[in-house]
Image (spheres, coloured by chain):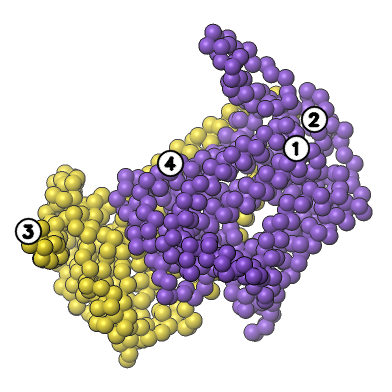
Chain colours: A yellow, B purple
């Protein structure tokens, strides 16, 4: 028994050591200003956390109306919006390609395609199977339109920065009042001018139909900078990790299974060794 | 495989037929009845755990290889596709990535175990040597695999590591170009790294076979380091150690599953979610946590070639360890002074890992304002101790230390109240 604890303690220490090392590295990589990162409580935090659907839907609106003028979501397809765990998932449309919201959102975008009869490049409305299209024809064009900086893709942005969702939220809410380019969270002037201002988008109430067909209406909050930043971060967190809800729910089942198995194995061990001094 | 008398008796005509021609069932049966010392503790369960790790990596890796595209323009995207669109890709990919960390975590415990209990001493030198080769190839495999997702750390890590070869005198530059397949890390590099990353795990599997064979031939070491003398000193591998290993595997899998499901990115680096960009060097290039101690040793000297030599020496010294330790006493339990040095050695390894993660010029341990010990100085002290442990402490302690009295046999130790 003592050995189990010893092993457990040393194992934990070893992992803690690794964790501390990681944190040190993370700190070393952080910004240098005296800005203090604001830590938020996200709906998707914790072992049971899920994405806030209404927030994700509003976040999609912010992305569509604000961010999408410069930033692509190249690893996300429209159909993903209607996948399980996604902002527009609907039990009635297990195949997201049939989901009317998804279809409508896709059709709202234009994608390029080669006309097979003429070879010309034509434009058509997107369908759910399309990926989010590029905003600029190429990186040079993107840089030329943005003072030399290429607006980064946002598909995995929440995972690509130390601090994750907190980082994205802080960047969006920490612009200097007097300088539209001075971002206090990053500690430098950046090429992206403050993209949000109060009332920039007009939020509508969010509708959501549950399993029994009952329609729930979630009242639209006021579109403050803080609210929009939270919402778009919720959406981008989903975009970066769309399978999180599935992962966590399978994780719980797996952990419970392993826990019971391990307890049973402990008793098997005790039973097999009961008459053996060691 | 092993020296103990076989008790397997084929019962049926087909098994009798097979036993005369290829006694493969007998080999498995003998494996199960293999006499193991009765006093093996939980540190001995990591062999089984490591076998599981290797199998997990190979199985998840083969599935990933079916969907991964080793091309500079598509590699990063294909990993995203695996996580988003491949059925259960969102589970297989983190299993493989977290699995690499868990594999190294287990192998480090396994190696410290071998060090503490003197498992490298006669007649187990071959077990230890094969273990060292396996570890070396594991490092290569881990490094090659980390390049494949083609994130910023993948690319710049590969650039830094392959740059080491450029420091070799005279042939360095051509050697480096030959390894990269060009002048810089690019598509040919990614292609060959993928091919080698797929190959090496099978080499490891074969070496594990030899490692286990050598171990069965020499017999397992045990916590008191006294060879089993009678039948009473041993127990059949099955069911005694299969059940103990299984319990330990359960605990290990709980930790593994926790990371896979709840913290899949905690052991990685955020920068690797940025696609590789040869034009943009990240502010800090840091290897995966399991290479940090060696990274610290590399940076402990100002000269590039010397740093590389020192890092190579840090691993090479493990290969000659069986001949450096002059003590006949295996287990540190009976070596009161060396035991303390060993604990310091483990601490030094952790400090090196910490230094590897930090910026050499930053202050690690502050004394007052703006003053203190930098990571560089700390890394130098820890590096010196790392080598001193192998090259000075172990050879000298073996000659001057007076070991504690050792029990006559395992059974005596178990029943006589000694630990």
Task: Provide the residue designation for mark 4.
Answer: A254
Q: Residue furthest left?
A: A117
Instruction: Name the N-terminal-most of marks 4 and 3.
Output: 3
Which quarter of the rendering shows the N terminus of chain A?
Answer: top right
Q: Label 2, secondary structure: give it.
A: loop
A126 relative position to B265: left or right:
left
Residue at left 62%, top 41%? B207
Residue B228 disc label: 2
CA gap, disc 2 to disc 4?
40 Å
Q: Chain of mark 2?
A: B
Instruction: Please name the residue that numbered disc 1 is placed on.
Output: B221
**Disc 1/disc 4 C-alpha distance (Å):** 35 Å
Q: Secondary structure at mark 1?
A: loop
User: Do the residues marked 2 and 4 share a common chain?
Assistant: no
Q: Are marks 1 and 3 on the same chain?
A: no
Q: Are marks 3 and 2 on the same chain?
A: no
In space, the residues marked 1 and 3 are separated at their CA atoms by 75 Å
Q: Is residue B192 left or right of residue B167?
A: left
Which of discs 3 and 2 lies nearer the camera? The answer is: 3
Please name which of the two marks, 1 or 4, marks the residue nearer to the observer. 1
Per the image, the residue denoted by label 3 is A117
Q: Position of residue A88 (x, y in %)?
A: 20, 55
Question: Secondary structure under badge 4?
Answer: helix
Mark 4 to mark 3 CA distance (whole Å) = 53 Å
């Amino acid at each position: 028994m003592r050995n189990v604890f010893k092993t457990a303690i040393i194992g934990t220490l070893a992992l803690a050591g690794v964790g501390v090392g990681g944190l040190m590295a993370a700190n070393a990589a952080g910004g240098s200003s005296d800005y203090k990162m604001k830590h938020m409580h996200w709906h998707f935090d914790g072992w049971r956390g899920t994405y806030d659907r209404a927030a994700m839907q509003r976040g999609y609106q912010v992305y569509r109306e604000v961010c999408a003028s410069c930033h692509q979501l190249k690893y996300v397809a429209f159909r993903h919006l209607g996948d399980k765990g996604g902002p527009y998932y609907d039990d009635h449309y297990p195949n997201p390609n049939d989901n009317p919201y998804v279809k409508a959102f896709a059709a709202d975008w234009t994608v390029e395609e080669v006309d097979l009869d003429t070879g010309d490049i034509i434009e058509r409305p997107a369908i759910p199977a399309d990926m989010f299209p590029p905003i600029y024809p190429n990186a040079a064009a993107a840089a030329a339109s943005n003072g030399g900086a290429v607006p980064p893709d946002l598909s995995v942005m929440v995972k690509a920065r130390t601090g994750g969702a907190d980082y994205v939220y802080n960047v969006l809410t920490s612009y200097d009042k007097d300088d539209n380019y001075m971002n206090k969270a990053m500690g430098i002037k950046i090429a992206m001018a403050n993209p949000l201002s109060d009332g920039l988008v007009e939020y509508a109430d969010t509708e959501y139909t549950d399993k029994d067909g009952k329609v729930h209406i979630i009242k639209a909050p006021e579109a403050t900078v803080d609210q929009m930043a939270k919402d778009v971060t919720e959406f981008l967190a989903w975009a970066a990790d769309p399978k999180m809800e599935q992962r966590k729910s399978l994780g719980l089942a797996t952990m419970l299974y392993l826990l019971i198995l391990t307890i049973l194995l402990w008793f098997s061990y005790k039973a097999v060794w009961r008459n053996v001094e060691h | 495989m092993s020296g103990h008398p076989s008790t397997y008796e084929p019962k049926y005509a087909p098994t009798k037929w097979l036993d005369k021609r290829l006694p493969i069932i007998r080999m498995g049966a003998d494996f199960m009845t293999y006499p193991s010392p009765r006093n093996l503790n939980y540190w001995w369960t990591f062999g089984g755990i490591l076998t599981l790790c290797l199998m997990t990596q190979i199985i998840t890796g083969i599935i990933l290889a079916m969907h991964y595209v080793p091309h500079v323009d598509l590699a990063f995207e294909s990993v995203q596709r695996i996580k988003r669109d491949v059925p259960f890709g969102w589970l297989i990919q983190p299993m493989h990535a977290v699995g690499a960390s868990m594999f190294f975590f287990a192998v480090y415990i396994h190696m410290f175990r071998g060090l503490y209990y003197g498992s490298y001493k006669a007649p187990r030198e071959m077990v230890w040597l094969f273990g060292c080769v396996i570890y070396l190839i594991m490092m290569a495999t881990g490094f090659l695999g980390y390049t494949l997702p083609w994130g910023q750390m993948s690319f710049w890590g590969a650039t830094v590591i392959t740059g080491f070869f450029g420091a070799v005198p005279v042939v360095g530059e051509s050697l480096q170009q030959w390894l990269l397949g060009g002048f810089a890390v690019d598509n040919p590099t990614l292609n060959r790294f993928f091919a080698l990353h797929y190959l090496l795990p099978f080499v490891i599997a074969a070496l594990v076979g030899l490692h286990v064979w050598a171990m069965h031939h020499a017999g397992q070491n045990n916590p008191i380091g006294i060879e089993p003398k009678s039948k009473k000193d041993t127990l059949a591998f099955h069911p005694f150690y299969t059940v103990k290993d299984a319990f330990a595997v359960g605990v290990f899998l709980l930790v593994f599953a926790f990371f896979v499901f709840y913290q899949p990115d905690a052991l990685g680096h955020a920068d690797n979610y940025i696609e590789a960009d040869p034009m943009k060097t990240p502010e800090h290039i840091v290897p995966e946590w399991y290479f940090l101690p060696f990274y610290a040793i590399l940076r402990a000297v100002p000269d590039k070639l010397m740093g590389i030599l020192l890092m190579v020496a840090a691993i090479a010294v493990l290969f000659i360890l069986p001949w450096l330790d002059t003590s006949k006493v295996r287990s540190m339990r009976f070596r009161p002074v060396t035991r303390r040095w060993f604990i310091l050695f483990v601490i030094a390894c952790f400090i090196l890992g910490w230094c590897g993660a930090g910026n050499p010029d930053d202050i690690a341990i502050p004394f007052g304002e703006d003053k203190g010990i930098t990571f560089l100085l700390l890394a130098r002290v820890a590096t010196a101790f790392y080598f001193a442990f192998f090259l000075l402490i172990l050879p000298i302690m073996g000659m001057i230390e007076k070991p504690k009295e050792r029990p006559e046999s395992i059974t005596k130790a178990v029943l006589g109240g000694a630990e």
